[in-house]
Image (tube, helix red, strand yellow):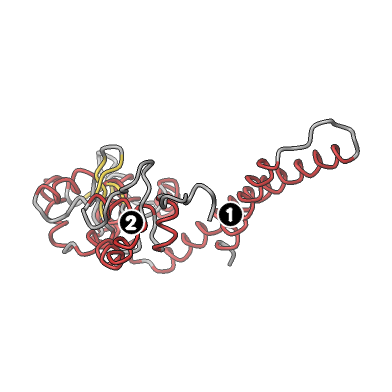
Amino acid sequence: MTPTDTTRDGLSDRGLTARLELARWQLRLGREHGMLPNPDLPGDLWSPEAVADCTERVGAVKAAFGADPPIGAERAAVRLAARVRMDVERADVEVLVARDALEVVSTYRDYPLYLLRDLDALAPATVIKVVRARKGPLVESVDPRGAARILAWPRNTFDDVAAERDLPVDRLGRYALTDIQALADDTDLKRRVEQSRRHAALLKAKREEEQREESVRLWLDACTAYLDRRTAEPPPILTLRRAMKSLVTARAQAEAHEP
């Protein structure tokens, strides 16, 4: 525990989340929903009594909000689109809230946030009804952005596949919804796209790893220069700490994308 986590008087946010094995967002939601007490000491610290109170309530917080952090309307729409295989938009998510089908669990910079499990619990028919009402006569077609959203692909990936398959478009440049849904059902295509995505992510992670390694080498060069009296100033230790922390993260990400 670092000196900023606790004092003789109480526990900080950071120290409390570590003690309770909570994520910071879980602590924030627990406080917002009145499930956890607010800090009761100056400097936003929790007293031992408040910590004990939080300890008794932590199970209820984890049960209420789960382990996945909430997401905004745009990501919620993408998640729903892939699930119901229609081009769900941010506005559809807002309509679902207005109809009391979906709960806003919190906000971030005034933007509403939603729990993944609340989104996954929505009946597909409820979501589809909202999308159909918004699209009207365009319900059987989707634009390229909507198609990529249904498939949960990057836009450039969809554009490449659409050109490869020579998918027809109407006078508005829109694709037939059935054609996009057929792509979603193509298991070989999905496997190929996923392999391509993982390969691209691996290359990006490897580049990041190489950059972080170079930062550490530069610090070592500066340290050697100081030892050899070629410079009067030693390199800051804080620079090495940051570089090593970034390197550890980059290597973990690269390993996660390895075949």
**Where is the C terminus found, in terms of image quarters?**
bottom right
Location of residue 201 (image quadrant): bottom right
The residue closer to the viewer here, 227 or 137, is 227
Q: For this rendering, which residue is in front, 227 or 255?
A: 227
- Are there few (<14), some (14-19), or many (20+) residues within 10 Å of tag 1? some
User: Can you tell which of label 2 and label 1 is closer to the viewer?
Assistant: 2
221 versus 231 height, above or below: below
Q: How crowded is mark 2: few (under 14 residues within 10 Å), some or many (20 or more)?
A: many
Q: Is residue 137 visible?
A: no
| Residue hosting label 2 | 26
242 displayed left or right of 189: right
Which residue: 70% across, 42% down? 237
Query: In the rendering, which numbered label is found on residue 104?
Result: none
Q: Nearer the viewer, residue 143 or 198?
A: 198
Which one is nearer the viewer's eye here, 81 or 71?
71
Q: Residue at x 44, y 68 (%)?
A: 188
Q: Residue lying furthest front in this view? A: 8
Apparent side of residue 144 relative to residue 206 in the rendered image (left or right): left
- In the rendered image, residue 226, in percent from the top left (x then y), is placed at 84, 37
Q: Is mark 2 on a helix, strand or loop?
A: helix
Separation of residues labelled 2 and 1 (CA atoms): 23 Å
Q: What element carries label 1?
A: helix
Residue 150 screen position, x and y as percent:
30, 55
Which amino acid type is marked by label 2?
Gln
Disc 1 designates what residue?
249
Mark 1 belongs to which amino acid?
A: Thr
Say which residue appears at 32% left-offset and 44% top-offset: 145
- Measuring from the top left, give residue 38's x and y in whole percent: 28, 49
Residue 118 in which image quadrant: bottom left
The mark that comes first in sequence, 2 or 1, is: 2
Is residue 9 at all visible to an observer of this figure? yes
